[in-house]
Image: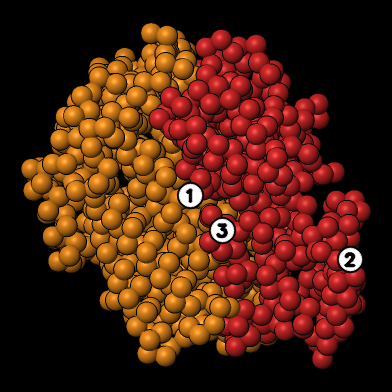
Chain colours: A orange, B red
């Protein structure tokens, strides 16, 4: 007899997500992923000035802030045939690189770590031993026994205060928490350090885009004009500030994030066999170094891998009406006129919300019918996993030496086979590996920018097609990028100087979507199958695998049994009184 | 302020327990006073309040939003602010940061709502969709409206973070398909602080919360419920490029010589003249820059319905609803008249040292703008 458990809200993500999973003999046998919030941004941008749309769609997400703005200006530039100046390309790359560093480190420490790190257990640590461990894995200066002892005292006082705040009701003492107390203390110290660090690296966005979150972008380039001999624009002072931030950012990635990731992963190698997923991976490619039109210049390559077969990488064509299609058969949208089981290419896509789910308050969703506000995208009819792991596997399969070396290095450090990549652990490790690569590349982009300026090129925007009167009456374009969470693309149709249609297919649409007309599961749902659950009242294992994707929507998980009855409320195991 | 103080430590005790010194504590108090725009004589009062005030329970809800407000909040600069906000207010429910998920998360919130009834602060990030009976945003199987009303019932006060909770923001832009609604239209019987912006500046968010924490009362609000300290001045009046506007020096297109020189962005659509916010004075991310300094006009993100006041790259005086012959200052005054009820000229005058100088500037601006289209 299968039990069905529901987790809602899934926390430490962006957005509202709910997972319902069926458990039989302590193993997940089926799972349903649902997004329970909708805003209708695609219909709001209809009829707007295409040059304004980046700002609207940027508000899709304030965590991976910038990527939707970037993708939107690329889509409009594609539609209008605008090539941006090399400096603007580098500034966009640097901003995206800074986002990777920020987003992945924050994900690791503040969104994912509490799945693996037992904060309360850190109280039992010997700070001297923590110091020895820290110094054996990194030369990061904050590593003395006194430092860790102070952190431990802070945690002690915090727990004794009786108000656990964000740490209340966490999974402390869970049988699946495997770190020694000393490593828990190390991770807690770096949780706090990372919280301070993260507000620095984003200043790169502030310098180029005026603020963070939600820096400004511009169709045709960037607005931060260069003036090497004036105080009015980007000058040496501003650029040196960027370089300092990038170097300090890289330092933290190299000396704190990566050593911590490897240290923690070494205690959870069994998670290299959990959360396997669908085996199909897709990357659109990103970080152009010779113009966005030259795919061969991209640092992350594009491609599709099927059935975990790294020996063959397929090409992706965003413009082909036969490749990427979205289905709405299990989503809360009006069916397409051509039928429930038909998909549409995003250029012809539509977003007509039609909620048919249960009336709130509800115990569980009716998963036999539509059960999510997320549509279901497919590539040539197949479900795809997107994200850091997909990017690295595509690069690996394409024979990218730099990526192969980075991946092989991590595998040999952890002493795990290649198969361990296709897992919850693999996704989390891939995120760290690529952060290190991107941190290096971002400094390369910075040097390219400096060399351009040195050589006298101070252009930052191409305004030749700025005036709508210069545009064709009808045109369409596609913009794409590799957001930290995976392949992201926007499709736009422009008619009479206005946005006629606009569709976004975001990474979490690929990963978190409901089933397609053939009944194929998407990545979240598939990755949960086969996961052992030690205690259905405390579904830590579900959260681990879902967090390994770094969801960008709001999630929810409830627990209920086969009769739809809620399992009794979980007691507060983290109570400070105990 | 509280009846459940026995086990809760004061801020001062908490800070000392964290290993900070009395000196650090005073530094923090001074910093907060500066953020809140208070006289230096108030520092002692803040310090005293913090020493004797127990930790404030906070419930932070997410509805129709993008989490940019939470992200901005954690950017708040002074390190001890992050410590205070994350450790010293008791953030008992936050979908972004809390360890627990599902039932464990909801149980934590329920406990705070019960134990600290009438004492906790409710922070709201996101608008609430009223369309289709509230089906467009559900958490833990309940509609956003239902959870909001539950949480609001026992709240001492409510903070509406960002333009979503304050004004509806992007999802409320035409045609507002989900009937996205700001929270003050749903709950009328509670004090609500509106902190608009997409997002608000991190230090402004910290400043608002610390005001409540330090003094046990809400900051002074304008007629729209915004803290006066941060929303009393137009971006245009505090902008370092204002002299270029007064002198009639404008960037004509992006990346032209004038924009490289840092001239005024008014003709490229800058909405600074109709926007009340602290961007030009406090700047962003520890004073590093703000949109205009980085070459892009203000899009007016803290103003009501700013999404529909575009296009962003069209001059404010061409915006529908404003007479073509008006100029940036009259537009600002009209906006102020509509939005803030007559505080316009007075607030402007308060910001610039001499009223006469202001009038001169406005007159210069008027004559400059007459020449813009010629």
Identify whether B316 is placed above or below A115: below
Q: Which quarter of the figure is the N terminus of chain A placed in? A: top left
| Nearer mark to the viewer, of 2 and 1 | 2
Q: Position of residue B237 (x, y in %)?
A: 76, 65
> On the image, numbered disc 1 is attached to which residue?
A63
Q: How crowded is mark 1: few (under 14 residues within 10 Å), some or many (20 or more)?
A: many
Q: Which quarter of the figure is the C terminus of chain A placed in? A: top left
Q: Position of residue A208 (x, y in %)?
A: 50, 68
Residue closest to the eye, B156 or A78:
B156
| Nearer mark to the viewer, of 2 and 3 | 2
Kindly check if marks 2 and 1 are in contact, taking CB atoms under 8 A apart as contact. no
Q: Where is residue B166 in the image (x, y as percent from the top left)?
A: 72, 43
* Structural distance between the alpha carbons of marks 2 and 3: 28 Å
User: Are the residues under badges 2 and 3 in a single subunit?
Assistant: yes
Chain of the residue displaying label 1: A
The residue shown at (28%, 55%) is: A251
Residue closest to the eye, B369 or A31:
B369
Residue B229 can be seen, yes or no: yes
Identify whether B111 is placed above or below A205: above
> On the image, numbered disc 3 is attached to which residue?
B287
Chain of the residue displaying label 3: B
Quarter-of-image position of residue B69:
top right
Kindly check if marks 2 and 3 are in contact, taking CB atoms under 8 A apart as contact. no
Image mark for residue B355: 2
Residue closest to the eye, A461 or A473:
A461
Element at label 3:
loop
The residue shown at (83%, 58%) is: B350
Kindly check if marks 3 and 1 are in contact, taking CB atoms under 8 A apart as contact. no
Identify whether A205 is placed above or below B230: below
* Structural distance between the alpha carbons of marks 2 and 1: 43 Å
């Amino acid at each position: 007899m299968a039990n069905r458990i529901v987790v809602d809200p899934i926390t430490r993500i962006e957005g509202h997500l709910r997972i319902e999973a069926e458990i039989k003999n302590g193993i997940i046998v089926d799972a349903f992923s649902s997004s329970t919030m909708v805003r209708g941004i695609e219909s709001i941008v209809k009829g707007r000035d295409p040059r304004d749309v980046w700002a609207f769609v940027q508000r899709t997400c304030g965590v991976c802030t910038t990527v939707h703005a970037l993708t939107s200006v690329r889509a409009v530039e594609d539609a209008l045939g605008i090539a941006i100046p090399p400096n603007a390309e580098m500034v966009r790359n640097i901003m995206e690189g800074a986002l990777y560093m920020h987003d992945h480190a924050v994900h690791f420490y503040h969104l994912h770590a509490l799945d693996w790190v037992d904060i309360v257990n850190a109280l039992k640590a010997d700070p001297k031993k923590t110091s020895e461990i820290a110094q054996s894995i990194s030369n990061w200066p904050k590593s003395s026994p006194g430092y860790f002892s102070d952190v431990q005292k802070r945690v002690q006082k915090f727990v004794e205060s009786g108000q656990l705040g964000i740490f209340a009701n966490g999974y402390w003492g869970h049988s699946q928490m495997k770190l020694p107390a000393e490593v828990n203390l190390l991770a807690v110290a770096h949780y706090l350090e990372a919280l301070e660090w993260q507000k620095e690296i984003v200043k790169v966005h502030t310098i180029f885009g005026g603020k963070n979150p939600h820096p400004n972008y511009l169709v045709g380039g960037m607005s931060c004009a260069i003036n090497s001999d004036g105080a009015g624009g980007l000058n040496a002072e501003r650029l040196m500030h960027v370089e300092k931030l990038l170097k300090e950012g890289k330092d933290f990635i190299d000396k704190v994030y990566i050593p911590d990731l490897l240290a923690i992963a070494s205690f959870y190698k069994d998670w290299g066999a959990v959360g396997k997923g669908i085996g199909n991976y897709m990357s659109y490619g990103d970080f152009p170094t010779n113009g966005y039109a030259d795919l061969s210049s991209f640092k992350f390559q594009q491609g599709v891998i099927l059935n975990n077969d790294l020996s063959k990488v397929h090409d992706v064509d965003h413009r082909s009406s036969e490749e990427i299609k979205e289905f709405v058969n299990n989503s809360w949208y009006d069916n397409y006129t051509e039928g429930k089981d038909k998909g549409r290419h995003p250029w012809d896509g539509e977003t007509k919300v039609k909620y048919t789910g249960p009336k709130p308050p509800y115990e569980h969703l009716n998963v036999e019918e539509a059960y999510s506000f997320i549509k279901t995208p497919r590539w040539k009819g197949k479900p795809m996993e997107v994200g850091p792991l997909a990017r690295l596997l595509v690069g690996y399969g394409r024979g990218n030496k730099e990526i192969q070396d980075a991946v092989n290095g991590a595998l040999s450090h952890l002493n795990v086979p290649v198969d361990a990549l296709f897992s919850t652990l693999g996704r989390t490790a891939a995120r760290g590996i690529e952060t290190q690569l991107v941190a290096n590349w971002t400094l390369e982009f910075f040097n390219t920018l400096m060399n351009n300026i040195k050589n006298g090129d101070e252009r930052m925007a191409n305004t030749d097609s700025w005036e709508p009167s210069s545009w064709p009456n009808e045109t369409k374009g596609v913009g794409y990028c590799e957001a930290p969470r995976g392949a992201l693309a926007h499709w736009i149709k422009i008619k009479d100087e206005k946005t006629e249609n606009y569709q976004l297919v975001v990474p979490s649409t690929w990963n978190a979507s409901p089933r397609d007309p053939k009944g194929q599961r998407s990545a979240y749902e598939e990755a949960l199958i086969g996961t052992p659950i030690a205690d259905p009242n405390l579904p830590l294992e579900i959260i681990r695998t879902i967090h390994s994707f770094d969801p960008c929507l709001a999630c929810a998980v409830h627990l209920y049994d086969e009769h739809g009855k809620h399992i009794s409320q979980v007691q507060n195991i983290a109570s400070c009184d105990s | 302020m509280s009846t459940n103080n026995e086990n809760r430590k004061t801020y001062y005790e908490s800070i000392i327990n964290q290993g900070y010194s009395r000196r650090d504590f005073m530094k923090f108090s001074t910093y907060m006073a500066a953020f809140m725009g208070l006289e230096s004589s108030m520092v002692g009062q803040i310090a005293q309040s913090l020493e004797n005030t127990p930790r404030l329970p906070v419930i932070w809800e997410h509805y129709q939003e993008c989490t940019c407000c939470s992200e901005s909040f954690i950017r708040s600069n002074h390190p001890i602010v992050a410590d205070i906000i994350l450790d010293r207010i008791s953030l008992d429910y936050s979908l972004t940061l809390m360890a627990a998920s599902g039932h464990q998360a909801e149980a934590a919130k329920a406990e705070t709502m019960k134990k600290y009834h009438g004492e906790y602060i409710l922070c709201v990030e996101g608008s609430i969709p009223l369309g289709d009976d509230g089906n467009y945003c559900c958490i833990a199987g309940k509609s956003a409206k239902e959870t909001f009303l539950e949480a609001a019932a026992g709240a001492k006060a409510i903070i509406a973070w960002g333009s979503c909770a304050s004004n509806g923001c992007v999802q409320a832009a035409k045609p507002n398909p989900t009937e996205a609604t700001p929270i003050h239209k749903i709950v009328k019987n509670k004090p609500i602080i509106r902190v608009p912006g997409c997002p608000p500046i991190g230090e402004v968010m910290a400043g608002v919360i610390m005001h409540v924490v330090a003094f046990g009362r809400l900051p002074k609000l304008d007629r729209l419920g915004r803290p006066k300290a941060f929303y009393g001045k137009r971006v245009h009046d505090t902008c370092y490029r204002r002299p270029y506007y007064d002198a009639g020096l404008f960037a004509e297109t992006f990346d032209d010589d004038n924009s490289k020189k840092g001239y005024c962005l008014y003709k490229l659509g800058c909405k600074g003249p109709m926007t009340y916010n602290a961007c030009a004075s406090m700047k962003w991310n520890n004073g590093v820059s703000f949109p205009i300094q980085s070459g892009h006009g203000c899009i007016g993100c803290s103003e009501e319905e700013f999404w529909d006041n575009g296009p962003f790259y069209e001059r404010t005086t061409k915006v529908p609803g404003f007479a073509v012959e008006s100029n940036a200052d009259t537009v600002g005054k009209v906006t102020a008249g509509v939005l803030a009820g007559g505080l316009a000229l007075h607030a402007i005058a308060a910001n610039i040292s001499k009223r006469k100088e202001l009038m001169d500037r406005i007159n210069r601006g008027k004559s400059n703008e007459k020449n813009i289209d010629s």
